[in-house]
Each structure stands twice: as structure tokens, then as C-alpha cells.
Amino acid sequence: MNIRLASLLAFTLLCSSLSAQEKPNVLFIAIDDLNDWVASFEGHPQAKTPHLDAFAETGAVVFKNAHCAAPVCGPSRSALLSGFMPNRSGVYGNTQNMLAAELVQTHATLPEYFAKNGYHSLSMGKIFHSHHTATGTDKGQWAFEEWHDVEIGSSVNRDKLTSRDRNLIHGKPGPPSKYTKSSGSEFSWGPTKGPIEETRDYKTARWAAEKLQEESEKPFFLAVGLTRPHLPFYSPQEFFDLYDPAEFRANRIRKNDLDDILTPEGKKKFKPTPDYLWLKENGLIDEAALAYMAACSFADACLGVILESLKTSPHYENTIVMLWGDHGWHLGEKLRYRKVTGWSESTRVPLMVRLPGMTERQDTIRAVNLIDLYPTLIELCNLPEKPEIDGRSFAPLLDDPQQEWNFPSLTLVGQKNASVVDERWRYILYPDGTEEVYDLHQDPMEWTNLAAKKTPEIAAVKERLGKVIPKTYMPGIQSPSVDKKSKKQGKIIDGTLKAIRDLTKLK
Ligand SMILES: [Ca+2]
Ligand SMILES: [Ca+2]
């Protein structure tokens, strides 16, 4: 071996060992049901989200045209964490556990792939959607080397609510009950009696903040899930106090908005939902919007605890931060509440990414999707490529957020109901042939359905965006049987599932 070749080899070895040591950490933060009511995303003019906005201003790319793979928790998170779109995994709804999907049984999920490739993976809060299984509750704890749960009872319990909370039961005038019937996700809101320190999200944030101060032998993949603003909208009083009820208004709602969405037979496809009608009848539309907004500000404050800790931690200059909401939320727009629709209110998510060294805010309107997170993180952390998964790395956009990027973003609403968006247009196609087309430049609230217009321009939009719609759909996977006893007890699953997740055998 000549000297030149030997030194080249040494240099190569040094570089590879250096790059192994210097792999960036990943701080992966999910905020449940956070729509674009974040000041940086301009979804509501009165939004107060100072920590999310400071995060953007101090150096991050703000993805203003990011959408979910599916507009409800389970399939959205299953897609982005498994790397497989719903039509390939068969996970279309909240009750389907992706562990029953063949592709998920053979492929590592995102945190598992990081653990497989030298990272320490750890988590607290909602990252995976939870499911009841034969052996207890599956919260995705099998996917992390270190997993923590906030102890049951520390969340905003009914005894911590004041009498201001209201209850909606299937859209009928829900008795304005003094207390809600459970701490589940019924449509109600109100201030908590306890302070922020007693809430689940604050405790989760504190845990992450402390973890960030610790030294780490390996690079880490730290996943933190905040549960607000998900229903019920219970927040400490200080977050309700940020908004004046006399001033705060829901976004403008067009009463005839649904009239231009017609089936091929000419019938109206949608009608106002019962909870919308109930809120309207009781004059609560602005109040409900304020409660949601307060819950966004509450989540923002908890997020601030994590981000402040990162800034003073030994890891600040070597940590990628990826911050995302799992889908949007209607607050009266299209005469409805909640999610699970193909419209922007439901598909658009806040997404921001900070790479070490970024010092300025950069916005991009290039269309991206949460399914892209997995391949993007693989590229950013220089892990082995994983061509089998869906999505496309948007790492190039972090380098140059304005570069050309002609990839429309697809959202699947249940099975065979597709919504596609690019920088200007939205196209929705339902299994019965109903179509919608919106020009987002002229009509960002998607009020005027142009699908019936017989112009070459609209035909071209349908053809171009229609190409992204899948041709094949896996049948919906069968959910495993549920042990009612363990469900009732909220028992956490034991090692049974861990045994089937042997990292060495997963691709
Ligand atoms: Ca959600
Ligand atoms: Ca309309």
C-alpha cells in the first residue's frame, strides 16, 4: 500500500468515525389537533402563540403548505411513523392498530429505525395513537428504548374543572352539566381548577426539558407529544384570560358554503353537522373558538418549557427540531367542527423544522406532507436509505426553501376519498364521483367550488392533481380483539408486543 493510499484510507476512516459521533440529535414534537391557529401560520388573526413564533423567528423553516397523510389522529400518525400511506398499510381509521398491518410487522417504525441505527430513542406523551389490545393499552411504548407515561390522574380531571364547562351530546342541546361525564374527548371546554403545573402536558414538557439537560452517550431521538388543543378544551384560566370574549371571533362562516358541492346526481353532498347547529342555536360559536384558541396557547406555553431548555442545553447546536400538528380542525368553517374532511381546515398542519446553525426564519409555500417526515429525517441524519417507504425527503427545501418543488400533497380521508393540493389548487375526489376544485390564490377559505366549470384550466387541474390519487387500496386491516377487563383498567401492555418487534429482524 503506498503512503498516499494509506493516508487517504485513514482520512476516510476518521471522517466516518467523526460523522458517527457527530450525528445530530432529533427533537420530535407532536401537538395533538393543532391547526393553523398559530400566529406564524395566519390561520386566525387573534392567535397568541409566542413560543411557536419565537421558535420560527430564531431560525427555522416554516412550512406554510404542509398537510397530513390522513386527517385524523390514528391514520395520520400511523402513516408518518410507519412510513406507509393508508392505502398501503390498510390503516384508514382510529380503531385500526397498525401493528396488524403486514408492512408494519416487517418494517421498523421511525423511532425504531433510529434505534436500529445507533440512536437512543425515548419518549413521553402522545406520539403513537393508542389502541386497546388483548393484553392492555398499546400506546406505542414498544417503539422506544425508553418510554414514559404521565401517571393516571395527573391530567385535567373532572374535579379540577369549574362549572363553566359545557357539554355537547350528539348535537342535541347537551345539558350544560356542571361536570363532564368523563375526561374523554367530548365537546366541552372550561378552565381547570388546578395550575398549569398539575396538567399532563406541562409534566410532559418538564420531563423533556430535564432530559435535554442530560449528557447523552449516543445521539438521541427524543419524541414528545402534547395532548392539547385536542378536545376537551380544558386549559388553566390564564390562557382563557389571554382573549377578551367581547373581541374574540371565530373565522367567518359562509352559510351557503356547502350548496355548491353536488354529487353526480345533483344532490347536496353535505349538510351542517349537529354540533355546529347546536353551537349556533346556543350562540356559542365564538366562545368555542376562544376555548380552542386558549388550548392552543396552553400547548404553546408547554412547548416553550421544552424549547427554553433546549437553548441552554449542551445539545442546542447539534439537535434537529421537527415540530408538527397531526391534522387540522374545523371551528365552524364548512358548517362543521372537528376533522376528517379533505378541506384545508382539516388537512393543513403547522410544520416547522430547525437545523443546527439556522439563525433566521424562512417561509416556504412548497407543498409537503407529514408522510415526508420519515425519509427527511433519514436524509438529515445520514441513516441508510429506506426506499420501500412512502413520502419524499424535503431536506433540499431546508437548504433552499424557494427551490422548485412540483410535488402535490395527498391526503386520504378514510378509504378512497382523496384530496390533493399544490401551491395554487385543491382537488377533492369522492368514491361516488363528487368533485371539488378550489383556486387557493383567489379563495384560500375554499368557498367557491370550481369543479363544474368546463374550462381547459379546470380540466388540467383535475388531470394533474388526479394523477397523485392512488389506484390501489389495501383492504382495511382487522383490529385485534380487545380484552374488556384490561381496557377498563387502562392496563399498559406488557412485553408481548415488544417480543414481536425484534429490531434486528425489521427492515
Ligand atoms: Ca389529533
Ligand atoms: Ca362553497
Image (tube, rainbow, N blue to C red):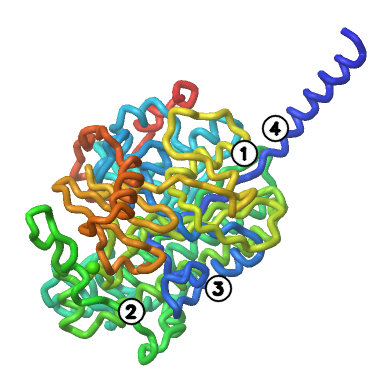
Alpha carbon of mark 4 to alpha carbon of mark 3: how far?
36 Å
Residue placed under numbered mark 1 in the picture: 381
Given this view, does label 4 or label 2 mark the residue nearer the observer? Answer: 2
Q: Which residue is mark 4?
A: 20
Identity, as a three-letter code, of the amino acid under mark 2: Ala
Front position among marks 3 and 2 = 2
Mark 4–mark 2 distance (CA, rounded to whole Å): 50 Å
Q: Which residue has dot 3 on it?
A: 50
* Residue 460 placement, left or right of 60: left
The type of residue carrying mark 1 is Cys
Q: Residues within 10 Å of mark 4 (few under 14, many from 20)?
A: some
Select label 1 or label 2 by which is in front. Answer: 2
Residue at (20, 40) in percent of width and height: 482
Numbered label attached to residue 250? 2
375 is higher (above) or lower (below) than 203: above
Q: Nearer the viewer, residue 177 or 259?
A: 259
Quadrant housing the N terminus: top right
